[in-house]
């Protein structure tokens, strides 16, 4: 009996290692590249994406506007080596708590702390075919987001993938996420049609006359479309393709097709929304009776992103339980 239990324990450990090894290996390789970049900047290499190397840092809410290449580069190099060591432990053993904590900390830091408002800004401008705000710091942020995603996958698989039971709060939090998408969308659409909701009339008149209404219409429309797609997380058409979709009608919607875009959107909203809240808390944003529309609707981004992340997770649990 004791021998059979020991054999079962060993088999479970092997399965756990197999499930987490690819993600942990990828996260470890990424960490080595991350650390190498830090070492290069600490040694005086060019292209440092923070501080003086990022002229838009203060404008877009970077948390590293005062970073110096030497000290920050050394910190990045140390984190890279630490991450590689943690990944090695995760590949070779199961159930270690310290590497798991580090993995989640790396994921949150890389996905939320490093990126700033320019990520969601450039995402919106992509729908207008505009890439004038692309720069080196943005590329480094995308690199960090990719690394954060790898660390999240490594941590998730290392701990066994979490619960498999659906949750009861999925429907209300999904409707909350859809509603939270509307304040910003409504304000932008109102500006597009010439209604100065929350701003002075002259604020939008000049921009609309020169074609700025197109920008407002696209940004507002993205929010409305996002609200509709969010409702799909609790609707039948979010699980089975509707009849009006050629070739796919009646087929099951792959779980990843809803989860990946939902988590990406939630991540961008949390990144940007947290910066807006910081500006507001520091007094950099002042809302007045005649000018609350410039930044006020954007304060819904953070709760919107958190609600969307929860709604996407609830959808994942429900579909996986099926």
Image (tube, grey):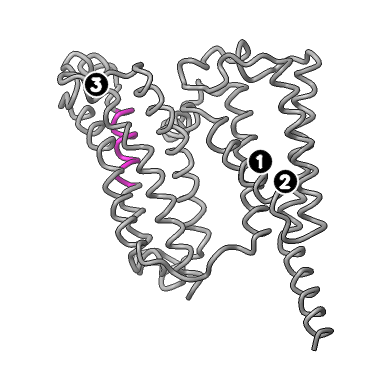
Examine the residues drawn in magenta and state their main secondary structure.
helix
Q: Residue at x 75, y 56 (%)?
A: 22
Q: Nearer the viewer, residue 176 or 245?
A: 176
Reading the chain from its start, which is encountered first: label 1 or label 2?
Answer: 2
Q: Nearer the viewer, residue 222 or 166?
A: 166
Image spot of residue 72 (x, y percent): 69, 20
Reading the chain from its start, which is encountered first: label 2 or label 3?
Answer: 2
Tell me the magenta residue range: 214-225
Indicate yes or no whether the magenta region holds residue 170. no
Binning the other alpha carbons within 10 Å of mark 1 as few (below 14), some (14 to 19) or many (20 upward) gives many
Q: Which residue is mark 2?
A: 27
Marks 2/3: CA distance?
A: 42 Å
Q: Which residue is mark 3?
A: 287
Image quadrant of residue 303? top left
Q: Residue at x 41, y 73 (%)?
A: 250
Q: Secondary structure at mark 3?
A: loop
Single out the residue that lies furthest toward the front.
Answer: 2
Q: Which residue is mark 1?
A: 147
Q: Secondary structure at mark 2?
A: helix
In the rendered image, the vertical position of residue 251 relative to residue 282, given as above or below: below
Q: Residue at x 74, y 41 (%)?
A: 83
Q: Which one is in front in this view, the residue at disc 1 or the one at disc 3?
A: 3
Image quadrant of residue 212? top left
Q: Residue at x 41, y 69 (%)?
A: 240
Q: Is residue 194 visible?
A: no
Binning the other alpha carbons within 10 Å of mark 2 as few (below 14), some (14 to 19) or many (20 upward) gives many
Q: Is residue 71 left or right of residue 50?
A: right
Image spot of residue 91 (x, y percent): 79, 56
Image spot of residue 35 (x, y percent): 77, 31
């Amino acid at each position: 009996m004791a021998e059979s239990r020991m054999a079962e324990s060993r088999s479970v450990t092997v399965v756990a290692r197999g499930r987490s090894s690819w993600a942990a290996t990828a996260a470890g390789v990424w960490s080595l590249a991350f650390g190498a970049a830090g070492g290069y900047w600490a040694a005086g290499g060019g292209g440092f994406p923070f501080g003086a190397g990022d002229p838009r840092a203060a404008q877009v809410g970077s948390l590293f506007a005062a970073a110096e290449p030497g000290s920050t580069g050394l910190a990045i190099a140390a984190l890279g080596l630490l991450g590689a060591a943690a990944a090695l432990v995760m590949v070779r053993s199961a159930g270690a708590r310290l590497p798991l904590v580090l993995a989640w900390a790396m994921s949150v830091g890389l996905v939320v702390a490093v990126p700033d408002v320019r990520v969601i800004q450039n995402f919106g401008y992509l729908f207008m075919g505009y890439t004038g705000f692309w720069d080196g710091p943005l590329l480094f942020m995308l690199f960090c987001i990719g690394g954060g995603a790898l660390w999240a996958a490594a941590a998730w698989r290392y701990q066994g993938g979490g619960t498999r039971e659906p949750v009861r709060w999925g429907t209300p939090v999904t409707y909350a996420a859809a509603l939270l998408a509307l304040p910003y969308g409504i304000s932008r659409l109102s500006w597009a049609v010439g209604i100065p909701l929350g701003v002075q009339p002259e604020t939008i008149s000049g921009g609309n006359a020169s074609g700025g209404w197109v920008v407002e219409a696209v940004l507002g429309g993205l929010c409305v479309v996002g609200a509709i797609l969010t409702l799909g997380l609790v609707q039948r058409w979010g699980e089975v393709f509707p009849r009006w979709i050629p070739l796919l009608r009646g087929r099951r919607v792959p779980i990843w097709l809803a989860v990946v875009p939902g988590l990406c959107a939630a991540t961008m909203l949390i990144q940007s929304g947290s910066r807006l809240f910081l500006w507001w808390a520091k007094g950099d944003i002042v809302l007045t009776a005649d000018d609350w529309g410039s930044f006020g609707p954007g304060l819904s981004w953070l709760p919107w992103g958190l609600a969307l992340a929860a709604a996407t997770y609830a959808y994942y649990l429900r579909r996986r339980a099926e």
